[in-house]
Amino acid sequence: MAATSASASSAIASSTCASRNAGTQLGSSSCSLRLPSSASSNLKHSCSLLGQRLEASIGVRKTRSSPAGNNGVRAELGDTLEEFLTKSCKDKGLARLMMAMGEALRTIAFKVRTASCGATACLNTFGDEQLAVDLLANKLLFEALRYSHVCKWACSEEDPVPLDMEGEGYSVAFDPLDGSSIVDTNFTVGTIFGVWPGDKLTDITGRDLAASAMGIYGPRTTYVLALADVPGTHEFLLMDDGKWQHVKETTEIGEGKLFSPGNLRATFDNPEYEKLINYYVGEKYTLRYTGGMVPDVNQIIVKEKGVFTNVSSPSTKAKLRLLFEVAPLGFLIEKAGGFSSDGTQSVLDKVVKSTDDRTQVAYGSKQEIIRFEETLYGSSRLSSVLSAAAA
Protein backbone atom coordinates (compact mmCIF):
# COMPACT_ATOMS: atom_id res chain seq x y z
CA MET A 1 0.00 0.00 0.00
CA ALA A 2 2.80 2.40 0.88
CA ALA A 3 4.60 1.63 -2.36
CA THR A 4 1.42 2.30 -4.33
CA SER A 5 0.90 5.62 -2.55
CA ALA A 6 4.48 6.63 -3.19
CA SER A 7 4.15 5.73 -6.84
CA ALA A 8 0.93 7.70 -7.16
CA SER A 9 2.44 10.69 -5.39
CA SER A 10 5.42 10.59 -7.71
CA ALA A 11 3.18 10.48 -10.77
CA ILE A 12 1.07 13.36 -9.52
CA ALA A 13 4.13 15.40 -8.68
CA SER A 14 5.55 14.79 -12.15
CA SER A 15 2.30 15.81 -13.81
CA THR A 16 1.90 18.84 -11.56
CA CYS A 17 5.39 19.97 -12.52
CA ALA A 18 4.23 19.99 -16.15
CA SER A 19 1.52 22.54 -15.41
CA ARG A 20 3.19 25.18 -13.23
CA ASN A 21 5.20 27.53 -15.40
CA ALA A 22 3.79 30.34 -17.56
CA GLY A 23 4.41 32.22 -20.83
CA THR A 24 2.78 34.06 -23.68
CA GLN A 25 2.30 32.20 -26.96
CA LEU A 26 1.07 28.90 -28.27
CA GLY A 27 4.47 28.35 -29.80
CA SER A 28 3.30 27.02 -33.16
CA SER A 29 4.20 28.87 -36.34
CA SER A 30 0.99 27.58 -37.86
CA CYS A 31 -1.27 29.22 -35.30
CA SER A 32 -1.71 32.92 -34.69
CA LEU A 33 -3.75 32.45 -31.53
CA ARG A 34 -2.37 34.05 -28.39
CA LEU A 35 -2.79 32.88 -24.85
CA PRO A 36 -2.77 34.80 -21.59
CA SER A 37 0.69 35.26 -20.13
CA SER A 38 0.23 32.16 -18.01
CA ALA A 39 0.25 29.52 -20.73
CA SER A 40 3.26 29.17 -23.03
CA SER A 41 5.81 27.46 -20.89
CA ASN A 42 3.08 25.11 -19.66
CA LEU A 43 2.52 24.10 -23.30
CA LYS A 44 6.21 23.70 -24.02
CA HIS A 45 6.96 21.75 -20.84
CA SER A 46 3.95 19.47 -21.27
CA CYS A 47 4.98 18.69 -24.85
CA SER A 48 8.55 18.07 -23.76
CA LEU A 49 7.43 15.54 -21.16
CA LEU A 50 5.06 13.98 -23.71
CA GLY A 51 7.95 13.55 -26.14
CA GLN A 52 10.09 11.86 -23.50
CA ARG A 53 7.30 9.40 -22.71
CA LEU A 54 6.68 8.70 -26.39
CA GLU A 55 10.34 7.95 -27.04
CA ALA A 56 10.34 5.55 -24.08
CA SER A 57 7.00 3.85 -24.72
CA ILE A 58 6.97 3.34 -28.48
CA GLY A 59 10.67 3.30 -29.31
CA VAL A 60 10.26 5.86 -32.07
CA ARG A 61 12.59 5.50 -35.05
CA LYS A 62 12.45 7.38 -38.34
CA THR A 63 11.87 4.29 -40.45
CA ARG A 64 9.25 3.67 -43.06
CA SER A 65 6.34 1.61 -41.77
CA SER A 66 5.54 -1.66 -43.48
CA PRO A 67 2.78 -4.23 -43.02
CA ALA A 68 3.51 -6.87 -40.42
CA GLY A 69 1.66 -10.05 -39.63
CA ASN A 70 -0.13 -10.48 -36.33
CA ASN A 71 1.31 -13.96 -35.85
CA GLY A 72 -2.18 -15.41 -35.64
CA VAL A 73 -2.49 -14.34 -31.99
CA ARG A 74 -5.86 -12.87 -31.02
CA ALA A 75 -6.07 -9.90 -28.67
CA GLU A 76 -7.93 -10.47 -25.43
CA LEU A 77 -9.65 -8.43 -22.75
CA GLY A 78 -7.08 -7.50 -20.12
CA ASP A 79 -4.36 -6.79 -22.67
CA THR A 80 -2.56 -3.49 -22.48
CA LEU A 81 -2.89 -1.17 -25.47
CA GLU A 82 0.59 -2.13 -26.62
CA GLU A 83 -0.22 -5.86 -26.38
CA PHE A 84 -3.50 -5.36 -28.24
CA LEU A 85 -1.84 -3.47 -31.08
CA THR A 86 1.05 -5.94 -31.29
CA LYS A 87 -1.40 -8.82 -31.66
CA SER A 88 -4.02 -7.12 -33.83
CA CYS A 89 -2.45 -4.42 -35.95
CA LYS A 90 -0.82 -5.58 -39.17
CA ASP A 91 0.90 -2.25 -39.77
CA LYS A 92 3.57 -1.34 -37.23
CA GLY A 93 3.39 2.29 -38.31
CA LEU A 94 -0.31 2.49 -37.51
CA ALA A 95 0.31 0.79 -34.15
CA ARG A 96 2.99 3.40 -33.40
CA LEU A 97 0.61 6.23 -34.25
CA MET A 98 -2.17 4.84 -32.05
CA MET A 99 0.29 4.45 -29.16
CA ALA A 100 1.47 8.03 -29.64
CA MET A 101 -2.08 9.34 -29.56
CA GLY A 102 -2.75 7.27 -26.45
CA GLU A 103 0.10 9.07 -24.70
CA ALA A 104 -1.38 12.42 -25.72
CA LEU A 105 -4.83 11.44 -24.45
CA ARG A 106 -3.34 10.44 -21.11
CA THR A 107 -1.73 13.88 -20.76
CA ILE A 108 -4.88 15.70 -21.88
CA ALA A 109 -6.94 13.77 -19.32
CA PHE A 110 -4.78 15.17 -16.51
CA LYS A 111 -4.95 18.69 -17.96
CA VAL A 112 -8.76 18.55 -18.21
CA ARG A 113 -9.00 17.49 -14.57
CA THR A 114 -6.81 20.40 -13.48
CA ALA A 115 -7.88 23.02 -16.07
CA SER A 116 -8.66 26.61 -15.29
CA CYS A 117 -11.93 27.12 -17.13
CA GLY A 118 -11.89 30.88 -17.61
CA ALA A 119 -12.49 31.78 -21.26
CA THR A 120 -9.64 33.33 -23.22
CA ALA A 121 -9.97 35.95 -25.93
CA CYS A 122 -8.95 33.38 -28.54
CA LEU A 123 -11.05 32.44 -31.52
CA ASN A 124 -10.27 29.57 -33.84
CA THR A 125 -10.39 29.86 -37.64
CA PHE A 126 -14.09 29.00 -37.67
CA GLY A 127 -14.91 31.71 -35.11
CA ASP A 128 -15.60 29.38 -32.17
CA GLU A 129 -14.47 30.69 -28.80
CA GLN A 130 -11.81 28.48 -27.21
CA LEU A 131 -10.81 27.76 -23.66
CA ALA A 132 -7.15 27.51 -22.73
CA VAL A 133 -7.40 23.74 -22.33
CA ASP A 134 -8.53 23.51 -26.01
CA LEU A 135 -5.27 25.05 -27.09
CA LEU A 136 -3.22 22.78 -24.88
CA ALA A 137 -4.97 19.65 -26.18
CA ASN A 138 -4.50 20.87 -29.75
CA LYS A 139 -0.78 21.41 -29.21
CA LEU A 140 -0.24 18.04 -27.49
CA LEU A 141 -1.94 16.10 -30.27
CA PHE A 142 0.14 17.76 -32.99
CA GLU A 143 3.28 16.99 -30.99
CA ALA A 144 2.25 13.34 -30.59
CA LEU A 145 1.77 13.02 -34.34
CA ARG A 146 5.20 14.52 -35.01
CA TYR A 147 6.81 12.11 -32.56
CA SER A 148 5.11 9.13 -34.21
CA HIS A 149 7.09 9.80 -37.42
CA VAL A 150 4.37 8.05 -39.47
CA CYS A 151 2.07 11.04 -40.00
CA LYS A 152 2.45 13.22 -43.09
CA TRP A 153 -0.41 15.72 -42.75
CA ALA A 154 -2.55 16.66 -39.77
CA CYS A 155 -5.25 19.23 -39.15
CA SER A 156 -7.70 20.02 -36.37
CA GLU A 157 -10.83 22.05 -35.81
CA GLU A 158 -8.57 24.72 -34.35
CA ASP A 159 -6.02 24.53 -37.22
CA PRO A 160 -8.04 23.31 -40.23
CA VAL A 161 -5.32 23.90 -42.82
CA PRO A 162 -3.25 20.66 -42.97
CA LEU A 163 0.20 20.96 -41.39
CA ASP A 164 3.24 18.90 -42.41
CA MET A 165 4.14 16.48 -39.60
CA GLU A 166 7.27 15.38 -41.51
CA GLY A 167 6.48 11.68 -41.39
CA GLU A 168 4.96 9.34 -43.95
CA GLY A 169 2.21 6.77 -44.10
CA TYR A 170 -0.89 8.44 -42.66
CA SER A 171 -2.80 11.70 -42.35
CA VAL A 172 -4.88 12.60 -39.29
CA ALA A 173 -7.77 14.95 -38.57
CA PHE A 174 -8.90 15.61 -35.00
CA ASP A 175 -11.17 17.58 -32.73
CA PRO A 176 -8.86 18.20 -29.74
CA LEU A 177 -11.54 18.77 -27.11
CA ASP A 178 -15.11 18.24 -28.20
CA GLY A 179 -17.49 19.75 -25.65
CA SER A 180 -14.98 22.22 -24.23
CA SER A 181 -17.79 24.66 -23.45
CA ILE A 182 -19.04 22.26 -20.76
CA VAL A 183 -15.67 21.65 -19.09
CA ASP A 184 -16.50 24.25 -16.43
CA THR A 185 -19.68 22.37 -15.49
CA ASN A 186 -17.62 19.18 -15.01
CA PHE A 187 -19.46 17.24 -17.72
CA THR A 188 -17.68 14.56 -19.70
CA VAL A 189 -15.73 15.83 -22.73
CA GLY A 190 -13.47 14.11 -25.23
CA THR A 191 -11.06 14.01 -28.14
CA ILE A 192 -11.99 12.63 -31.59
CA PHE A 193 -9.59 11.66 -34.36
CA GLY A 194 -9.55 9.84 -37.67
CA VAL A 195 -6.53 8.25 -39.37
CA TRP A 196 -6.47 8.04 -43.16
CA PRO A 197 -3.78 6.21 -45.14
CA GLY A 198 -1.77 8.35 -47.50
CA ASP A 199 -1.12 12.06 -47.75
CA LYS A 200 -4.45 13.85 -48.16
CA LEU A 201 -7.36 14.97 -46.00
CA THR A 202 -9.85 15.96 -48.72
CA ASP A 203 -11.48 13.90 -51.48
CA ILE A 204 -11.69 11.05 -48.99
CA THR A 205 -14.53 9.25 -47.21
CA GLY A 206 -15.00 7.52 -43.88
CA ARG A 207 -14.79 4.21 -45.74
CA ASP A 208 -11.13 5.01 -46.38
CA LEU A 209 -10.24 5.27 -42.68
CA ALA A 210 -7.45 3.05 -41.38
CA ALA A 211 -8.52 3.80 -37.79
CA SER A 212 -10.49 6.21 -35.67
CA ALA A 213 -10.78 6.80 -31.96
CA MET A 214 -12.06 8.98 -29.18
CA GLY A 215 -10.66 9.76 -25.77
CA ILE A 216 -13.34 10.20 -23.10
CA TYR A 217 -12.51 12.31 -20.03
CA GLY A 218 -15.14 11.63 -17.41
CA PRO A 219 -15.32 9.76 -14.09
CA ARG A 220 -13.22 7.21 -15.98
CA THR A 221 -10.72 8.01 -18.71
CA THR A 222 -11.14 5.72 -21.70
CA TYR A 223 -9.66 5.35 -25.17
CA VAL A 224 -12.17 3.87 -27.63
CA LEU A 225 -10.73 2.83 -30.98
CA ALA A 226 -11.45 0.86 -34.11
CA LEU A 227 -9.06 -0.44 -36.77
CA ALA A 228 -10.11 -1.15 -40.34
CA ASP A 229 -8.61 -4.65 -40.33
CA VAL A 230 -9.80 -5.66 -36.84
CA PRO A 231 -13.42 -6.60 -36.02
CA GLY A 232 -15.25 -4.56 -33.41
CA THR A 233 -14.76 -1.34 -31.51
CA HIS A 234 -12.52 -1.57 -28.46
CA GLU A 235 -12.49 0.29 -25.17
CA PHE A 236 -9.33 0.80 -23.11
CA LEU A 237 -9.41 2.07 -19.54
CA LEU A 238 -6.65 4.27 -18.12
CA MET A 239 -5.40 2.42 -15.02
CA ASP A 240 -3.69 3.77 -11.92
CA ASP A 241 -0.29 2.72 -13.27
CA GLY A 242 -0.81 4.91 -16.35
CA LYS A 243 -1.38 2.01 -18.76
CA TRP A 244 -4.36 1.51 -21.04
CA GLN A 245 -6.13 -1.81 -20.38
CA HIS A 246 -8.52 -3.49 -22.84
CA VAL A 247 -11.86 -3.75 -21.02
CA LYS A 248 -14.57 -4.06 -23.69
CA GLU A 249 -15.13 -5.18 -27.27
CA THR A 250 -18.38 -4.16 -28.98
CA THR A 251 -19.49 -5.95 -32.13
CA GLU A 252 -23.27 -5.45 -32.06
CA ILE A 253 -25.60 -2.52 -31.43
CA GLY A 254 -29.05 -3.86 -30.58
CA GLU A 255 -32.46 -2.32 -30.05
CA GLY A 256 -33.20 -0.33 -26.90
CA LYS A 257 -35.22 2.72 -25.93
CA LEU A 258 -32.43 5.20 -25.29
CA PHE A 259 -32.20 8.51 -27.18
CA SER A 260 -29.89 11.52 -27.36
CA PRO A 261 -31.52 14.29 -29.40
CA GLY A 262 -29.16 17.07 -30.44
CA ASN A 263 -30.13 20.44 -31.92
CA LEU A 264 -33.72 20.34 -30.65
CA ARG A 265 -34.17 23.91 -31.86
CA ALA A 266 -34.53 22.40 -35.33
CA THR A 267 -37.92 20.98 -34.33
CA PHE A 268 -39.30 24.54 -34.53
CA ASP A 269 -39.21 24.53 -38.33
CA ASN A 270 -38.48 20.90 -39.19
CA PRO A 271 -41.81 19.09 -38.64
CA GLU A 272 -40.34 15.71 -39.53
CA TYR A 273 -37.73 16.02 -36.79
CA GLU A 274 -40.45 17.13 -34.38
CA LYS A 275 -42.43 14.01 -35.32
CA LEU A 276 -39.39 11.82 -34.62
CA ILE A 277 -38.82 13.39 -31.19
CA ASN A 278 -42.50 12.99 -30.35
CA TYR A 279 -42.21 9.31 -31.27
CA TYR A 280 -39.34 8.83 -28.81
CA VAL A 281 -41.27 10.59 -26.04
CA GLY A 282 -44.54 8.82 -26.80
CA GLU A 283 -42.83 5.42 -26.79
CA LYS A 284 -41.27 6.25 -23.42
CA TYR A 285 -37.64 6.22 -24.53
CA THR A 286 -35.13 7.11 -21.82
CA LEU A 287 -33.56 10.53 -22.46
CA ARG A 288 -29.76 10.44 -22.07
CA TYR A 289 -28.28 13.65 -23.48
CA THR A 290 -25.35 15.59 -22.04
CA GLY A 291 -24.71 18.18 -24.75
CA GLY A 292 -21.35 16.56 -25.52
CA MET A 293 -21.16 14.51 -28.72
CA VAL A 294 -18.40 12.22 -27.42
CA PRO A 295 -20.20 10.90 -24.31
CA ASP A 296 -23.55 10.74 -26.11
CA VAL A 297 -22.14 8.62 -28.94
CA ASN A 298 -19.95 6.61 -26.58
CA GLN A 299 -22.97 5.47 -24.58
CA ILE A 300 -24.37 3.74 -27.69
CA ILE A 301 -21.17 1.70 -27.90
CA VAL A 302 -20.98 0.98 -24.17
CA LYS A 303 -24.70 0.24 -23.67
CA GLU A 304 -24.90 -1.48 -27.08
CA LYS A 305 -28.22 0.23 -27.84
CA GLY A 306 -29.80 3.61 -28.48
CA VAL A 307 -29.80 6.44 -30.99
CA PHE A 308 -28.08 9.82 -31.33
CA THR A 309 -29.52 12.48 -33.63
CA ASN A 310 -28.41 15.95 -34.68
CA VAL A 311 -30.69 17.30 -37.39
CA SER A 312 -30.66 20.59 -39.30
CA SER A 313 -33.54 22.85 -40.34
CA PRO A 314 -33.99 26.04 -42.39
CA SER A 315 -33.18 28.18 -39.36
CA THR A 316 -30.61 25.92 -37.65
CA LYS A 317 -28.01 24.73 -40.11
CA ALA A 318 -25.85 21.64 -39.63
CA LYS A 319 -22.79 22.41 -37.53
CA LEU A 320 -21.07 19.05 -37.03
CA ARG A 321 -17.98 18.73 -39.21
CA LEU A 322 -17.67 15.63 -41.37
CA LEU A 323 -13.89 15.36 -41.26
CA PHE A 324 -13.23 16.02 -37.59
CA GLU A 325 -16.29 14.51 -35.89
CA VAL A 326 -18.95 12.82 -37.98
CA ALA A 327 -16.86 10.42 -40.10
CA PRO A 328 -14.52 9.22 -37.30
CA LEU A 329 -17.45 8.61 -34.93
CA GLY A 330 -19.43 6.95 -37.72
CA PHE A 331 -16.50 4.57 -38.23
CA LEU A 332 -16.52 3.66 -34.52
CA ILE A 333 -20.28 3.08 -34.54
CA GLU A 334 -20.31 0.96 -37.70
CA LYS A 335 -17.31 -1.12 -36.58
CA ALA A 336 -19.27 -1.74 -33.36
CA GLY A 337 -22.14 -3.18 -35.38
CA GLY A 338 -24.27 -0.06 -35.56
CA PHE A 339 -25.34 2.21 -38.41
CA SER A 340 -25.07 5.86 -39.36
CA SER A 341 -27.00 8.19 -41.63
CA ASP A 342 -27.18 11.75 -42.92
CA GLY A 343 -30.80 11.07 -43.84
CA THR A 344 -30.21 9.22 -47.08
CA GLN A 345 -26.83 7.45 -46.82
CA SER A 346 -24.20 6.30 -44.37
CA VAL A 347 -21.99 9.18 -43.26
CA LEU A 348 -19.03 6.98 -44.21
CA ASP A 349 -20.03 7.35 -47.86
CA LYS A 350 -19.98 11.16 -47.81
CA VAL A 351 -16.97 12.63 -49.61
CA VAL A 352 -14.95 15.21 -47.69
CA LYS A 353 -14.53 18.09 -50.14
CA SER A 354 -13.46 20.70 -47.61
CA THR A 355 -12.25 20.57 -44.01
CA ASP A 356 -15.31 22.69 -43.12
CA ASP A 357 -17.92 20.35 -44.64
CA ARG A 358 -20.82 19.97 -42.21
CA THR A 359 -23.72 17.56 -42.03
CA GLN A 360 -26.65 16.35 -39.99
CA VAL A 361 -26.26 12.85 -38.59
CA ALA A 362 -27.83 9.93 -36.75
CA TYR A 363 -26.05 6.98 -35.14
CA GLY A 364 -27.68 3.87 -33.68
CA SER A 365 -29.04 0.41 -34.30
CA LYS A 366 -30.37 -0.65 -37.70
CA GLN A 367 -34.03 -0.20 -36.75
CA GLU A 368 -33.36 3.24 -35.26
CA ILE A 369 -31.60 4.41 -38.42
CA ILE A 370 -34.44 3.02 -40.57
CA ARG A 371 -36.90 4.98 -38.41
CA PHE A 372 -34.75 8.11 -38.69
CA GLU A 373 -34.57 7.96 -42.49
CA GLU A 374 -38.23 7.01 -43.00
CA THR A 375 -39.50 9.73 -40.66
CA LEU A 376 -37.37 12.49 -42.14
CA TYR A 377 -37.45 11.47 -45.83
CA GLY A 378 -40.24 8.94 -46.29
CA SER A 379 -38.07 5.91 -47.07
CA SER A 380 -34.92 4.14 -45.93
CA ARG A 381 -32.15 2.54 -47.95
CA LEU A 382 -31.79 -0.02 -45.13
CA SER A 383 -35.43 -1.18 -45.23
CA SER A 384 -35.06 -1.55 -49.00
CA VAL A 385 -32.08 -3.82 -48.43
CA LEU A 386 -34.03 -5.87 -45.89
CA SER A 387 -36.98 -6.23 -48.27
CA ALA A 388 -34.70 -7.38 -51.08
CA ALA A 389 -33.02 -9.90 -48.79
CA ALA A 390 -36.39 -11.27 -47.66
CA ALA A 391 -37.53 -11.67 -51.26
Image (cartoon, rainbow, N blue to C red):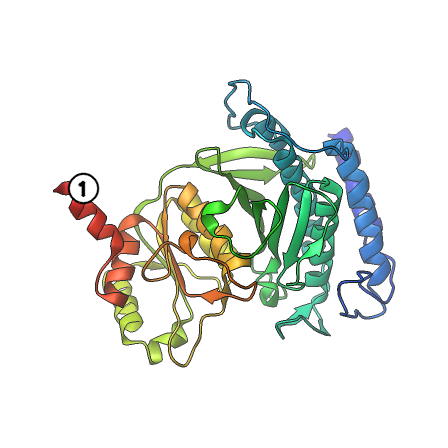
Q: Secondary structure at mark 1?
A: helix
Relative side of 244 to 1, left or right? left
Image height of 75 relative to 301, above or below = above
Q: Quadrant of the N terminus?
A: top right
Note whether residue 127 is visible: yes
Camera-nearest residue between 145 and 259: 145
Camera-nearest residue between 179 and 374: 374
Image point 60% across, 45% down: which residue?
Answer: 198
Image height of 202 relative to 35, above or below = above
Please state the horizontal and vertical placement of residue 289, each as a whole percent of the image. Answer: 43, 61
Type of residue at label 1?
Ala
Which residue is disc 1 drawn over?
Answer: 389
Please state the horizontal and vertical placement of residue 152, each as a whole percent of the image. Answer: 68, 47
Image height of 82 relative to 264, above or below = above
Q: Quadrant of the C terminus?
A: top left
Please state the horizontal and vertical placement of residue 55, each as a whole percent of the image. Answer: 79, 36
